[in-house]
Amino acid sequence: MKHLRTFVSFALLALAAGVLTAPVAAEPRVPLPTIAKGMGDQCVEPLEVIRRDHMDFLNHQRDKTTHEGIRTKQHSLTNCLECHTSKDDEGNWVPVNEPGQFCSSCHTYAAVSMDCFQCHATTPE
Ligand code: HEC
Ligand code: HEC
Ligand code: HEC
Protein backbone atom coordinates (compact mmCIF):
# COMPACT_ATOMS: atom_id res chain seq x y z
CA MET A 1 0.00 0.00 0.00
CA LYS A 2 2.81 2.38 0.87
CA HIS A 3 4.37 1.61 -2.49
CA LEU A 4 1.19 2.52 -4.27
CA ARG A 5 0.90 5.82 -2.35
CA THR A 6 4.47 6.67 -3.25
CA PHE A 7 3.75 5.82 -6.84
CA VAL A 8 0.61 7.93 -6.92
CA SER A 9 2.27 10.99 -5.43
CA PHE A 10 5.19 10.55 -7.81
CA ALA A 11 2.78 10.38 -10.70
CA LEU A 12 1.02 13.52 -9.50
CA LEU A 13 4.32 15.30 -9.13
CA ALA A 14 5.34 14.31 -12.62
CA LEU A 15 1.99 15.49 -13.91
CA ALA A 16 2.33 18.83 -12.15
CA ALA A 17 5.86 19.21 -13.44
CA GLY A 18 4.65 18.37 -16.90
CA VAL A 19 1.97 21.01 -16.72
CA LEU A 20 4.41 23.57 -15.39
CA THR A 21 7.02 22.94 -18.06
CA ALA A 22 4.53 22.73 -20.91
CA PRO A 23 4.70 26.43 -21.90
CA VAL A 24 8.49 26.22 -21.91
CA ALA A 25 8.36 23.37 -24.39
CA ALA A 26 6.58 25.70 -26.83
CA GLU A 27 9.62 28.02 -26.95
CA PRO A 28 11.96 27.60 -29.92
CA ARG A 29 14.52 24.90 -29.20
CA VAL A 30 17.26 26.34 -31.37
CA PRO A 31 19.13 29.47 -30.33
CA LEU A 32 18.08 32.52 -32.30
CA PRO A 33 20.74 34.59 -34.04
CA THR A 34 21.98 37.72 -32.39
CA ILE A 35 20.92 40.60 -34.55
CA ALA A 36 22.56 43.97 -34.18
CA LYS A 37 20.08 46.72 -33.42
CA GLY A 38 19.77 49.32 -36.17
CA MET A 39 20.83 52.91 -35.69
CA GLY A 40 18.29 55.57 -34.92
CA ASP A 41 15.09 55.12 -32.98
CA GLN A 42 13.13 53.00 -35.37
CA CYS A 43 13.07 51.28 -38.70
CA VAL A 44 11.34 52.51 -41.86
CA GLU A 45 8.42 50.27 -40.93
CA PRO A 46 7.14 48.89 -37.62
CA LEU A 47 9.36 46.09 -36.37
CA GLU A 48 6.93 43.22 -36.98
CA VAL A 49 6.22 44.50 -40.48
CA ILE A 50 9.83 44.99 -41.58
CA ARG A 51 10.79 41.61 -40.14
CA ARG A 52 8.16 39.83 -42.16
CA ASP A 53 7.90 41.92 -45.32
CA HIS A 54 11.27 43.61 -45.98
CA MET A 55 11.91 41.52 -49.10
CA ASP A 56 8.62 42.67 -50.57
CA PHE A 57 9.41 46.32 -49.88
CA LEU A 58 12.80 45.96 -51.54
CA ASN A 59 11.46 44.16 -54.59
CA HIS A 60 8.66 46.66 -54.94
CA GLN A 61 11.08 49.54 -54.63
CA ARG A 62 13.32 48.02 -57.26
CA ASP A 63 10.45 47.71 -59.72
CA LYS A 64 9.41 51.28 -59.09
CA THR A 65 12.94 52.53 -59.65
CA THR A 66 13.89 50.46 -62.65
CA HIS A 67 10.54 50.52 -64.45
CA GLU A 68 9.10 53.88 -63.53
CA GLY A 69 12.22 55.81 -62.60
CA ILE A 70 10.74 56.67 -59.22
CA ARG A 71 13.35 57.08 -56.51
CA THR A 72 12.24 57.36 -52.94
CA LYS A 73 14.34 56.88 -49.90
CA GLN A 74 12.18 54.93 -47.50
CA HIS A 75 12.58 51.46 -48.98
CA SER A 76 15.77 51.94 -50.95
CA LEU A 77 18.54 49.46 -50.32
CA THR A 78 21.10 52.18 -49.72
CA ASN A 79 18.83 53.60 -47.06
CA CYS A 80 18.85 50.28 -45.21
CA LEU A 81 22.62 50.39 -45.09
CA GLU A 82 22.65 53.86 -43.55
CA CYS A 83 21.26 52.37 -40.36
CA HIS A 84 22.22 48.71 -40.54
CA THR A 85 25.94 48.80 -41.31
CA SER A 86 28.52 49.07 -38.58
CA LYS A 87 32.14 50.20 -38.42
CA ASP A 88 35.14 48.23 -37.23
CA ASP A 89 37.70 49.40 -34.65
CA GLU A 90 39.59 51.40 -37.30
CA GLY A 91 36.44 53.22 -38.32
CA ASN A 92 35.98 51.40 -41.64
CA TRP A 93 32.57 50.19 -42.75
CA VAL A 94 32.04 46.45 -42.43
CA PRO A 95 30.12 45.09 -45.47
CA VAL A 96 26.58 44.35 -44.33
CA ASN A 97 26.65 40.90 -45.93
CA GLU A 98 29.76 39.69 -44.08
CA PRO A 99 29.25 36.83 -41.63
CA GLY A 100 27.64 38.07 -38.43
CA GLN A 101 26.61 41.44 -39.90
CA PHE A 102 23.03 42.61 -39.95
CA CYS A 103 21.63 41.22 -43.20
CA SER A 104 23.62 37.99 -43.10
CA SER A 105 23.12 37.09 -39.44
CA CYS A 106 19.49 36.33 -40.09
CA HIS A 107 19.84 35.00 -43.59
CA THR A 108 22.49 32.48 -42.63
CA TYR A 109 20.27 31.36 -39.79
CA ALA A 110 17.19 31.11 -42.01
CA ALA A 111 19.22 29.61 -44.88
CA VAL A 112 18.21 32.43 -47.21
CA SER A 113 20.54 33.11 -50.08
CA MET A 114 20.27 36.41 -51.87
CA ASP A 115 22.31 37.72 -54.77
CA CYS A 116 21.51 41.42 -54.31
CA PHE A 117 24.99 42.33 -53.09
CA GLN A 118 26.68 40.99 -56.20
CA CYS A 119 25.61 44.28 -57.75
CA HIS A 120 24.59 46.52 -54.89
CA ALA A 121 26.99 48.26 -52.53
CA THR A 122 27.41 46.62 -49.14
CA THR A 123 28.35 49.79 -47.26
CA PRO A 124 26.71 53.23 -47.20
CA GLU A 125 29.73 54.92 -48.86
C1 HEC B 1 22.65 42.01 -61.74
C2 HEC B 1 22.78 43.14 -60.85
C3 HEC B 1 21.70 43.33 -59.80
C4 HEC B 1 21.25 42.40 -58.87
C5 HEC B 1 21.70 40.96 -58.68
C6 HEC B 1 20.26 43.08 -58.05
N1 HEC B 1 20.12 44.38 -58.47
FE1 HEC B 1 18.91 45.80 -57.63
N2 HEC B 1 19.44 47.10 -59.07
C7 HEC B 1 20.39 46.89 -60.04
C8 HEC B 1 20.48 48.07 -60.88
C9 HEC B 1 21.42 48.24 -62.06
C10 HEC B 1 19.54 49.01 -60.36
C11 HEC B 1 19.27 50.41 -60.85
C12 HEC B 1 20.27 51.27 -60.13
C13 HEC B 1 19.77 52.61 -59.94
O1 HEC B 1 19.16 53.14 -60.86
O2 HEC B 1 19.98 53.12 -58.83
C14 HEC B 1 18.90 48.37 -59.21
C15 HEC B 1 17.98 48.99 -58.41
C16 HEC B 1 17.46 48.45 -57.24
C17 HEC B 1 16.62 49.14 -56.29
C18 HEC B 1 16.14 50.57 -56.39
C19 HEC B 1 17.28 51.54 -56.06
C20 HEC B 1 17.66 51.51 -54.59
O3 HEC B 1 18.84 51.60 -54.25
O4 HEC B 1 16.75 51.38 -53.78
C21 HEC B 1 16.34 48.28 -55.27
C22 HEC B 1 15.51 48.53 -54.03
C23 HEC B 1 17.00 47.04 -55.60
N3 HEC B 1 17.67 47.17 -56.80
C24 HEC B 1 16.94 45.92 -54.82
C25 HEC B 1 17.54 44.72 -55.14
C26 HEC B 1 17.36 43.52 -54.36
C27 HEC B 1 16.52 43.40 -53.10
C28 HEC B 1 18.10 42.54 -54.96
C29 HEC B 1 18.24 41.09 -54.55
C30 HEC B 1 17.01 40.34 -54.43
C31 HEC B 1 18.74 43.16 -56.15
N4 HEC B 1 18.35 44.46 -56.22
C32 HEC B 1 19.59 42.48 -57.00
C33 HEC B 1 21.12 45.74 -60.21
C34 HEC B 1 20.97 44.57 -59.53
C1 HEC C 1 16.60 55.27 -39.79
C2 HEC C 1 17.33 54.03 -39.55
C3 HEC C 1 16.86 52.77 -40.25
C4 HEC C 1 16.67 52.56 -41.61
C5 HEC C 1 16.83 53.57 -42.74
C6 HEC C 1 16.31 51.17 -41.76
N1 HEC C 1 16.25 50.56 -40.53
FE1 HEC C 1 15.76 48.60 -40.17
N2 HEC C 1 15.83 48.96 -38.17
C7 HEC C 1 16.23 50.14 -37.57
C8 HEC C 1 16.13 49.99 -36.12
C9 HEC C 1 16.46 51.07 -35.08
C10 HEC C 1 15.66 48.68 -35.89
C11 HEC C 1 15.37 48.03 -34.55
C12 HEC C 1 13.97 48.47 -34.16
C13 HEC C 1 13.56 47.94 -32.80
O1 HEC C 1 14.27 47.13 -32.22
O2 HEC C 1 12.49 48.37 -32.37
C14 HEC C 1 15.48 48.05 -37.20
C15 HEC C 1 15.04 46.75 -37.40
C16 HEC C 1 15.04 46.08 -38.62
C17 HEC C 1 14.74 44.68 -38.83
C18 HEC C 1 14.33 43.70 -37.75
C19 HEC C 1 15.55 43.20 -37.03
C20 HEC C 1 15.14 42.29 -35.90
O3 HEC C 1 15.69 42.45 -34.81
O4 HEC C 1 14.30 41.41 -36.10
C21 HEC C 1 14.87 44.42 -40.16
C22 HEC C 1 14.69 43.10 -40.87
C23 HEC C 1 15.24 45.66 -40.80
N3 HEC C 1 15.34 46.65 -39.84
C24 HEC C 1 15.47 45.81 -42.15
C25 HEC C 1 15.61 47.02 -42.78
C26 HEC C 1 15.61 47.18 -44.23
C27 HEC C 1 15.47 46.06 -45.23
C28 HEC C 1 15.75 48.53 -44.46
C29 HEC C 1 15.75 49.25 -45.81
C30 HEC C 1 14.56 49.10 -46.60
C31 HEC C 1 15.86 49.19 -43.18
N4 HEC C 1 15.77 48.24 -42.19
C32 HEC C 1 16.05 50.56 -42.98
C33 HEC C 1 16.66 51.29 -38.21
C34 HEC C 1 16.58 51.51 -39.58
C1 HEC D 1 15.19 39.41 -38.67
C2 HEC D 1 15.91 38.58 -39.62
C3 HEC D 1 16.35 39.23 -40.94
C4 HEC D 1 17.14 40.33 -41.13
C5 HEC D 1 17.83 41.16 -40.06
C6 HEC D 1 17.24 40.53 -42.55
N1 HEC D 1 16.51 39.58 -43.21
FE1 HEC D 1 16.18 39.48 -45.21
N2 HEC D 1 15.13 37.76 -44.95
C7 HEC D 1 14.84 37.16 -43.75
C8 HEC D 1 14.08 35.95 -43.98
C9 HEC D 1 13.56 34.98 -42.90
C10 HEC D 1 13.92 35.83 -45.38
C11 HEC D 1 13.21 34.72 -46.18
C12 HEC D 1 11.76 35.03 -46.16
C13 HEC D 1 10.97 34.09 -47.05
O1 HEC D 1 11.57 33.28 -47.74
O2 HEC D 1 9.75 34.24 -47.01
C14 HEC D 1 14.59 37.00 -45.97
C15 HEC D 1 14.63 37.27 -47.32
C16 HEC D 1 15.20 38.39 -47.88
C17 HEC D 1 15.18 38.70 -49.28
C18 HEC D 1 14.55 37.86 -50.38
C19 HEC D 1 15.59 36.84 -50.83
C20 HEC D 1 15.11 36.06 -52.01
O3 HEC D 1 15.80 36.07 -53.04
O4 HEC D 1 14.06 35.43 -51.87
C21 HEC D 1 15.83 39.90 -49.45
C22 HEC D 1 16.07 40.64 -50.74
C23 HEC D 1 16.29 40.31 -48.13
N3 HEC D 1 15.88 39.37 -47.20
C24 HEC D 1 17.01 41.46 -47.90
C25 HEC D 1 17.54 41.81 -46.66
C26 HEC D 1 18.44 42.91 -46.45
C27 HEC D 1 18.96 43.83 -47.53
C28 HEC D 1 18.72 42.92 -45.11
C29 HEC D 1 19.64 43.88 -44.37
C30 HEC D 1 19.36 45.31 -44.56
C31 HEC D 1 17.97 41.85 -44.49
N4 HEC D 1 17.27 41.20 -45.48
C32 HEC D 1 17.96 41.56 -43.14
C33 HEC D 1 15.20 37.62 -42.51
C34 HEC D 1 15.98 38.75 -42.25
Image (cartoon, grey):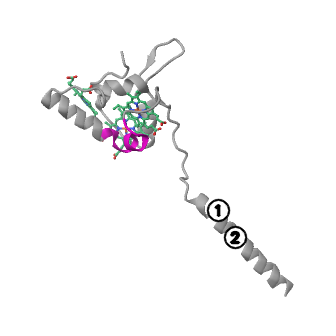
> Which range is magenta?
45-55
Q: Is residue 11 magenta?
A: no
Residue under numbered circle 2: 16
Name the dominant secondary structure of the magenta segment: helix
The image quadrant of residue 59 is top left
Q: Quadrant of the N terminus?
A: bottom right
Residue at horizontal 54 percent and vertical 49 percent from the top: 30
Is label 1 in a helix, a strand or a loop?
A: helix
Residue at horizontal 66 percent and vertical 68 percent from the top: 18
| Extreme-right residue of the structure | 2
Q: Quadrant of the C terminus?
A: top left
Q: Residues within 10 Å of mark 1 (few under 14, many from 20)?
A: few
Q: Residue 65 in the image: x percent, y percent?
A: 19, 28
Q: Residue 80 in the image: x percent, y percent?
A: 36, 28
Q: Is residue 2 left or right of residue 109?
A: right
Viewer-proximal residue among 22 and 42 = 42
Is label 2 in a helix, a strand or a loop?
A: helix
Give the mark nearer the N terminus: 2 vs 1: 2
Q: Is residue 51 left or right of residue 100?
A: left
Viewer-proximal residue among 67 and 103 = 67
Q: Residue 60 in the image: x percent, y percent?
A: 23, 37
Above or below: residue 108 compared with residue 41: below
Residue at horizontal 78 percent and vertical 77 percent from the top: 9
Viewer-proximal residue among 40 and 7 = 40
The label shown at residue 21 is: 1
The image quadrant of residue 109 is top left
Q: For the residues marked 2 and 1, what is the alpha-carbon distance in whole angstroms? A: 9 Å
The image quadrant of residue 67 is top left
Ligand 1 placement by image quarter? top left
